[in-house]
Image: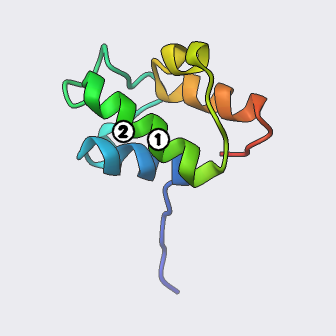
Amino acid sequence: MSETTESPPLLELVADVLGVGVVDLSEESGPATLAAWTSRKHLELVVTLEEFYGVSLSYSEIRGLRSISAAKRILAAKGVGV
């Protein structure tokens, strides 16, 4: 029996957009803690989240997307489980 550990899709999406490993991410990861989370990557992440989860983020939600945990809260408020 082989063990596989799957990362939640949100972490995989963020890691893919930022070009970092999933193991490099935590709930607190954000622009203040990751050099890879630039303003350009932030916009790419917004577009990726909107497309993947089928949601539309408001201006205030985009500005509030300051960490992985914030992304989870924003998506949960839209009824998306991550």
Whether residue 15 is visible, yes or no, is yes
Q: How far, Cα to Cα, is label 2 from label 1?
A: 5 Å
Label 1: how many Cα within 10 Å (few below 14, some 14–19, many 20+): some
* Residue denoted by label 2: 44
Q: Which residue is mark 1?
A: 47
Tell me residue 57's x, y (percent). 61, 29
Dividing the picture into quadrants, the one containing residue 45 is top left
Instruction: Write the residue at 27% across / 29% down.
Output: 40
Quick check: marks 2 and 1 in contact, CB under 8 Å? yes
**Taking 39 as reference, is 32 above or below it?**
above
Q: Is residue 8 visible?
A: no
Q: Amino acid at mark 2?
A: Glu
Q: Is residue 16 above or below residue 32?
A: below
Label 2 residue SS: helix
Query: Which quarter of the rendering shows the C terminus?
Result: top right
Give residue 57's mark: none
Colouring scheme applied when the structure was drawn: rainbow
Could you tell me how many numbered marks the image carries? 2
Which element type, helix, strand or loop, lies under badge 1? helix
Q: Quadrant of residue 80?
A: top right
Q: Is residue 45 above or below residue 42?
A: below
From the viewer's side, name the closer residue of 5 and 13. Answer: 13
List the single residue furthest toward the bottom.
1
